[in-house]
Each structure stands twice: as C-alpha cells, then as structure tokens.
Amino acid sequence: MSNVRRLSKKAGAAPLATPTDLDNSAVEEISAALNGLVADAFVLYLKTKNYHWHMNGKHFRDYHLMLDEHAESIESGIDPLAERVRKLGGETLHSFDEVLRLTSLKESNEGFLKPAEMFAQLIADNKTVVRSMREAHEICDKHGDAASAGLLEDTIDKAERRLWFLFETNQIRDDSAS
C-alpha cells in the first residue's frame, strides 16, 4: 500500500495522506532525491557551523561572519525541501541516523584545520550538493513536477553563491600587484 493519494474530493483521508496527481513511482523517486538533499543540507550545515566556530587566523572576523551567513542560508533551505516531500505525499527524514545514511557528504571530525583546509572541504561539499541538486531537478523535470523543480532552481542559485564566495575567499594570489 502506498502513502500517495490521488486528488479527490472524498472526505476521511488518513492523516498526512497528502493528495497528489503524480503517480506513486514519481512521488517515491522525487521524495528520495529531495530527502537526499535534506540529508546533505544537515551535514553541510553542521560542517559549516563547525568551521565557523573553529575559525582562526588573520581574517578571522570576515571568515567567521561569512560562514555564519552560509550556515543560515543552508539551514533556511532545509524546511522548504522537507515540506515539499510532504506536499507530494512522501515521507521525510526521521533521525540523524537517516541523515547519515542518506547524505553524500562526509562529516568533519578533525580537531584543527587551517582556514584554507576548511574552505577546500566546503568547496568540495558545495560542489557535490550543487551536482545532487541538478540531478534532483532532472528527476523533477522527468515527472513534470514544476513546483519541486522551481524550488530547486532557487536552492541551486543560493548554493552556487556560497560556492563562489568560498572559492574566491580561498584563492591565493598577490592582490598587492594590481
């Protein structure tokens, strides 16, 4: 039996049995992709906050504030993705165990990293997340789910902005020569 319900005017549907016009396989595939993004966002959020808390060096203030902004951006994207899964009639994540099983990212357990090392990891992770978002967008397009695709377009843009800032911050060049 599926949790997916077709749009109907019948009363008495089970609690949280959200109606949708998408078929069961579409809901399952889209929900799986979006739940993977939610898992990635949780891990990326924690890693970004970890580096924010453990930042050091001569550019501490700028880096500390930038990573806090990035963490806020990541966190603000979690709820819309999870709620989209529910709007489709899918099931969202229930635990950190699920997050760790579904994420495509690795946690950071190192005790001390230089800022350049932190940024290199965040650059790689944000690239992975953007790639996963594009793949999820393709799945949404395949099933005609314009709402999920539209949500992802905004989310991709925010992730690319973070990636751009991280990349430019981590460039080693002689700016005094210009």
Image (spheres, helix red, strand yellow):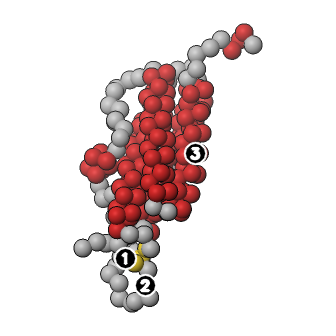
Q: Residue at x 60, y 32 (%)?
A: 165
Q: Amino acid at mark 1?
A: Arg
- Give the structural element (helix, strand or loop) at label 1: strand
The reply to whether the C-beta atoms of the residues labelled 2 and 1 are less than 8 Å apart is: yes
Report the residue marked by disc 3: 158
Measure the alpha-carbon separation of dots 2 and 3. Answer: 36 Å
Dot 3 alpha-carbon crowd within 10 angstroms: few under 14, some 14 to 19, many 20 or more: some
Residues 10 and 106: in front is 10
Which circle marks residue 8 in the picture?
Answer: 2
Q: Amino acid at mark 2?
A: Ser
Q: Position of residue 125 (x, y in %)?
A: 44, 35
Report the residue marked by disc 1: 5
Residues 24 and 84: in front is 24
Measure the alpha-carbon separation of dots 3 and 1. Answer: 32 Å
Q: Amino acid at mark 3?
A: Lys
| 165 in relation to 104, above or below | above
Residues 50 and 118: in front is 118
Q: Residue at x 47, y 51 (%)?
A: 138
Dot 2 alpha-carbon crowd within 10 angstroms: few under 14, some 14 to 19, many 20 or more: few
Q: Position of residue 85 (x, y in %)?
A: 41, 63
